Image (cartoon, coloured by chain):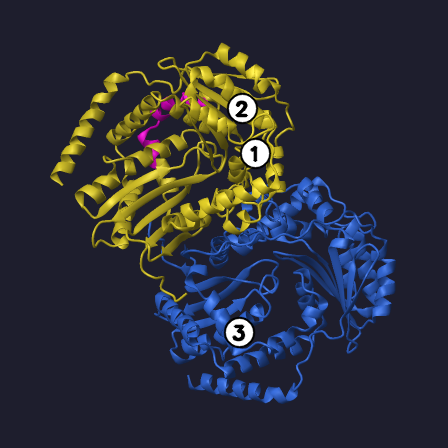
Chain colours: A blue, B yellow
Amino acid sequence: MRSAARVLALIAAVSLAAPAAMAETPKFAKNATSFTLDNGLQVVVIPDHRAPIVTHMVWYKAGAADEVPGVSGIAHFLEHLMFKGTKDHPEGEFSKVINSVGGNENAFTSDDTTAYHQTVAKQYLPQMMEFEADRMANLELDVPEVLTERDVILEERRMRIDGNPGARLGEAVRAALYQNSRYGIPTIGWQHEMEQLDLDDALAWYDRYYTPNNAFVIIAGDVTEDEVRKLAEDTYGKVKRRFDPPPRFRAVEPEPQAARTVTLSDPQVMQPSMQRLYLVPSYTTAEPGEAEALDILAEILGGGTTSRLYRDLVVDQGIAASAGTFYQSNQLGDTMLGFYGSPRGEVTLDQIEAALDRAIASVVADGVTAAEVASAKRRLIAATIFAEDNASTLARALGTAIATGETIEDAQNWPLAIDAVTVEDVNAAAARYLDIRRSVTGYLVGEPAKNPS
Amino acid sequence: MRSAARVLALIAAVSLAAPAAMAETPKFAKNATSFTLDNGLQVVVIPDHRAPIVTHMVWYKAGAADEVPGVSGIAHFLEHLMFKGTKDHPEGEFSKVINSVGGNENAFTSDDTTAYHQTVAKQYLPQMMEFEADRMANLELDVPEVLTERDVILEERRMRIDGNPGARLGEAVRAALYQNSRYGIPTIGWQHEMEQLDLDDALAWYDRYYTPNNAFVIIAGDVTEDEVRKLAEDTYGKVKRRFDPPPRFRAVEPEPQAARTVTLSDPQVMQPSMQRLYLVPSYTTAEPGEAEALDILAEILGGGTTSRLYRDLVVDQGIAASAGTFYQSNQLGDTMLGFYGSPRGEVTLDQIEAALDRAIASVVADGVTAAEVASAKRRLIAATIFAEDNASTLARALGTAIATGETIEDAQNWPLAIDAVTVEDVNAAAARYLDIRRSVTGYLVGEPAKNPS
């Protein structure tokens, strides 16, 4: 206890010292600029000349929530299949080049977007762009490749979800939270639908979404806009616009009427835990200022070791091994503000939930303080400053914002928008959204479920 | 208590007497025959000459679960708009004719189908067919009509759902039960999506689904197949096939992982109640014999006053004001087997749920008896015999089966399929499907929810 309290005091001292260093609120990614090629591809450049390195990302405005009923998992499946090669660059060549020059690469699929990225020494950027431009238009797939890769994603699902009770609970909780939107369906897909995905599904997805006017590129690092423009015209500029992408659509959730619970019981569970998700607006769906207020609210309640929940449950009462919040703020549709906690020793989930309920009731009834808001702002804005240190982190954060409908200016001004939040804004957001009817509470327990199976 | 027990003894005596009356299991709607017109319209005839009356139904193979994301309620909205008239028969004329001849009419929309029906004296059948054939092809709609009728369906939603806590709980419970299929979305639609429905949505739905080759007609009553064939050719036969309907699709549910609860709290609630829904197969999705076994299981556990739940909770313990089961068996996709109970006097929902849990645990662990199965079969088969007494009931039951993919023969043989169910079949269905992980439990309570709103 005593040592934890000392750590907190130290962090508080550091936080209090911070304002002097940022008398003026900084913009986020302030060097970012962008241009659009004739084929509709937007190219964003974030110059940063501190090291001769670049991060190159291609983002497609299509994610799991764009899937149609019955083919869940196709967005993520296509992400895998994009590594199968083209006529000019057969499978493996792209990755081999990256490895041979000491770079790294990866790709990810979310509800709203799919992205591919490499970080390499600056002189290899033209080659990265040529590879990505090539697979944007010329992907070649055949039935055996698709069937083999389908086994890979099924194995990925087995390992990441089916073999992990917490992940299975996560799927069930999201399915209960989202009553109308596709966010209730797992990004990786339902197993029984993944098993049916085939070459036709893959090509249909590729042909529908993989076109320059449905994509954008972010290049962050040791480059100038002029250099990038020239390279982009020589590579991506040659890719033909294949169609006009459909307007993006996310089904709106009905006003929630009833509190829900989800209990996943599995003998594998050694450490029980609970979570509580509330349906809240995202930066895309919120009224002006509301998402920023939710960011501050989440930070005050559960952001790190100085938050109310951590101090109450972990430090003061000592009943929790962990406690915190998360706000999935950058989504095209309505999203979740979540709380979690896991008990320490003999403490029960009921005790953790009761403490969480008290913390929530207290913030709804009595609000937050000006000091809490000021401190949360400092921490959130400081985090954006730290992000500036890493070109790859910067590119990813800016890309997520653009992929969910923000402009570059929106993203750049985010620290200013955070700075403008008032105590009243935070209290209004708490009162409006921390309503048990908007929530799902998930329990992960080791005991068998109460009914025989 | 004593008098209730006497009533039960009397019913049991009647049940025991029944087998003599049906030594051979009767077919259902055994006179039903069918033919198909050149335009693809199937016409089913069920002759019944006991009274000079006919029931005429037109069924479209399109229901709420065929809607695409964002336009929930359009199937039901179009049902309303079908009464707006055509060039030859302006709004109100059809209904006026029916009323003037002492007939009655109605329409309904379900997850899987939309149907329109009239019951009239036999001589008016040709006119009914002419009216229905006309609006199958020639519906005329304009913007003011659509906007006015949209207010009507919104008011219908306010009265039937929003003003009724039990209905609101029902929506939330189904949304939690169905994690993948559209059955989790209310047939009437979500209010915020209904408010956006417009003329284009209505015409798109009409043009997609209202074509003779996506419909069937059932005529039950004082007619012969030959008479109906002639009339059908003169009326429906003139309607052009507008397109080939898409294959019917219902997203398959993932194997459920976690028990769920939904609590709706509203000061309007004077009588608390609970329900428990299990995800189970329908007649369309089940393995052979499994849906029949579920029908028998539901009947044994909660079908009427001789059922286990009613006897235990209402009669013997006297803790429940009501208790029973329902099985929504005729659905294109996986469906629900439900249990419900409401406490008497000071009894709590927990006590009702505990009794339900015991009843379910007992049937899973110890199974049912041969006498219970025999008695349930008699009651289910007897119900089909009673249905034969009413041409309209018969038409509706047969239509529901056809609309969800059964053949006429499947439906006719249903009593035989029920008769073939064994004790082992029922026990296997109970063990497989009465698993708490497959379930959602709903609570309707009067107290405020535990968190402030």
Residue to which mark 3 is pinned: A425
The residue tagged with tag 3: helix, strand or loop? Answer: helix
Towards the viewer: A39 or B432? A39
Label 2, label 1: how many angstroms apart (C-alpha)?
Answer: 27 Å
Same chain assignment for discs 1 and 3: no
Q: Residue A115 at x, y = what percent?
A: 69, 58
Q: Earlier in the sequence, mark 2 or mark 1?
A: 2
The reply to whether callout 2 and callout 3 are in contact (CB within 8 Å) is: no
The relative height of residue B133 versus residue A101 in the rendered view (above or below) is above
Q: Give the chain of mark 1.
A: B
Q: Amino acid at mark 2?
A: Phe
Q: Is residue A102 visible?
A: no
Which disc number belongs to residue B248? 1
Q: Does the magenta portion include B365?
A: no
The residue tagged with tag 2: helix, strand or loop? Answer: helix
Which disc number belongs to residue B131? 2
Tell me if mark 2 has few (under 14), some (14-19) or many (20+) residues whose alpha carbon lies within 10 angstroms of its own: some
| Badge nearest the viewer, 2 or 1 | 2
Query: For residue B36, what is the image quadrant?
Result: top right
Towards the viewer: B101 or A402? B101
